[in-house]
Structures are given as C-alpha cells and as structure tokens.
Image: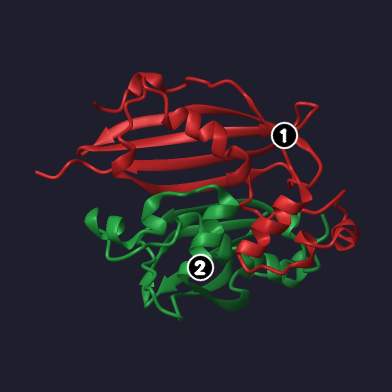
Amino acid sequence: MALNVELVGKQYPPQTYEVGREKIREFAAALGDSNPAYHDVDTAKELGHSDLVAPPTFAVVVTRGPQVAVIDDPELGLDFSRVVHGDQKFQYTRPIVAGEMLHTTASVHSARTIAGNDILTIRSDVADEAGAPVVSVFATLVARAVEG
Amino acid sequence: MAATVRASDVEVGTELPSQTFSLRRVDLIKYAGASGDFNVIHWNERVATEVGLPNVIAHGMLTMAEAVRVVTDWCGDPGAVVEYSTKFTKPVPVPDDDAGATVEVGGKVVEVLDAGRVKVELTATCDGVKVLGMARVVVQLV
C-alpha cells in the first residue's frame, strides 16, 4: 500500500503531556548532559525560567504519542518497517519547563512519493494550558523504495 | 531567557568550542528508555544487519541531541535555543565494544540575525563521515 498523499492537512486529536522534573533530569542524564539548568531548579530560576528547563530536543518526548497516532493511521499507508528518519526541525516560541501541561496537535504536513520513496512530514504543534504556542516540531520520515 | 554570550561579541565566522561525544551501546539503551524510541535497529544487532545496516545504529535524535550541546554549553542557557533543524545524512554505527562510536561536533556562526539572534551551523562527523547535514541552530543571545 502506497503513502496516501490525500491526507495532507489531516489533523489528529490533541494529546496532553505533563512535563515532570524527573523526566527532564532522566532525559538529560541519558544524554550524559550535566548542564545544571536541566538538573538544579535554583540554577534554572537564575536563568529566568520558572522551573527546570528542558533540553532543545526534549520536545520529541512530548510529541511522541501524537506522532505515533499519525504513523499508525491505517488510512496513511506508511510502511514503517522501511522507514528512516530523514530530517527534524524544532521551532520554539519559548522553552519547555517542568511542571506545565502541554497540548499537542499533530497533522500530516506533507506527503509525497519520489522515485518510489515515500516521504512524510508530520507537524506537531505544542501549546500550553492557555493555548499559547510553545514549539512546533517537524519530523520527516522516509520509507525507502522496495528494491527490485 | 538569559544567555551569557553577547550578540555584540559575536560575528560571522565566530567558532564555538568543539566537543567529542562517545556513543556506546549502553548510551543507546539509555536514550531509548528516556525518549520512548524502542526501534529495534537501535539495540538489536541481528535485526539491524538483517535490514541491511552495518551494525546497530544510534538514534538520529540522540546524535542531534548531543550535537546541540556545543551551542547550549557555549551560550549559557539551553532555553535560548529558538530553532534547531538537521538532516540525517548517514547513520552512526555503534560497535559492541567499550569505546562505541565517536561523534565530533563543531559549530560556527554563519549569520547574525535581528534582535540579538545568531545562526550557528554545526558539523558532526563519525570516523570522518558527515552524519548531520544542514544542522542549524538559531540562538537568542543578550
């Protein structure tokens, strides 16, 4: 089944994610990153944040569920077994901080087939409780053409 | 946001201190757990080689996360990163040994934008092979 390019623009139901201090610390520790802004609340506050600040790529944790909902959409026709990660972009309005509740709406940003490769870009817009934008995440997945 | 680097001290061509990151199998396991990305090609050599990869490969997002530390360690506040994008040009194979893979990352200011923002281009290589392409970070300086 080929990638369904008709789905461009389709939006998926919003999902909620609560940002925990320990999750930020765990994520930073997994990177071996001891930057005190990720671990020490006082340092983060001295930098002007309300609580621990999340690393720039932490938004992948927040947007994981919404992105999987797109990938798993049976109408989409993406062969995940052939997928490689093509590119990734984060556009921040402001950083993510511990203690906040975020709402993510994912959509099919673009879908095309070039030389047998299916190329899908999923856009995930993350907003705060007041509905103000926090970050937009663009993930491009490439399902490689079947050989032969 | 409170970066410690002043935009007035930076110009096109300013180089950021480069860093070297070592990615071992255990680092991939930790990242899988922390990120929720349990794709089998990042921890199972049998499956990775069956699908044509040279070995278990690092998550592209792990390489991306490590590379931006060249910017966050330099600018003084990780919250000052306003945009970050990259292409994943080549995989980072991670051998089953104590050293793992070594990723070398450098950064250079390529554009001075309005309102104290600058654009940094990152280069990331593993065994001399470029693993990130067009890796660019926009950072808000003071």
Indicate the amino acid at tag 2. Answer: Val
Q: Nearer the viewer, residue B111 or B31?
A: B31
Residue A93 in the image, given as x and y percentages of width and height:
71, 41
Q: Which chain is green?
A: B
SS of the residue under disc 2:
helix
Secondary structure type for disc 1: strand
Q: Residue at x 90, y 61 (%)?
A: A42
Q: Residue furthest bottom?
A: B99
Q: Point out the frontmost of discs 1 and 2.
A: 2
Q: Cβ–Cβ below 8 Å for labels 1 and 2? A: no
Question: Percent x, y for residue B133?
Answer: 42, 60
Instruction: Compare residues B5 and B29 and report the one nearer the observer.
Output: B29
Where does label 1 land, which residue? A102
The kind of residue tagged 1 is: Leu
Q: CA distance from mark 1 to mark 2?
A: 30 Å
**Which of the 4 image quarters holds residue A101?**
top right
Which colouring convention does the figure follow? by chain
**Farthest residue in the left direction?**
A148
| Dot 2: chain letter | B
The residue that label 2 is drawn on is: B26
Query: Residue A113: percent from the left, percent from the top?
Result: 27, 33
Is B4 positioned to the left or the right of A148 in the image?
right
Q: Chain of mark 1?
A: A
Is B76 placed above or below B33 here?
below
The picture places residue A112, in percent across and down from the top left corner, at 32, 31
Vertical side of B110 occupied by A78: above or below: above
Q: Depth check: A4 or B8 in front? A: A4
Residue beneath the point at 38% across and 62% down? B57
The residue at the point 81 percent across, 68 percent down is B4
Q: Quadrant of the N terminus of chain B?
A: bottom right
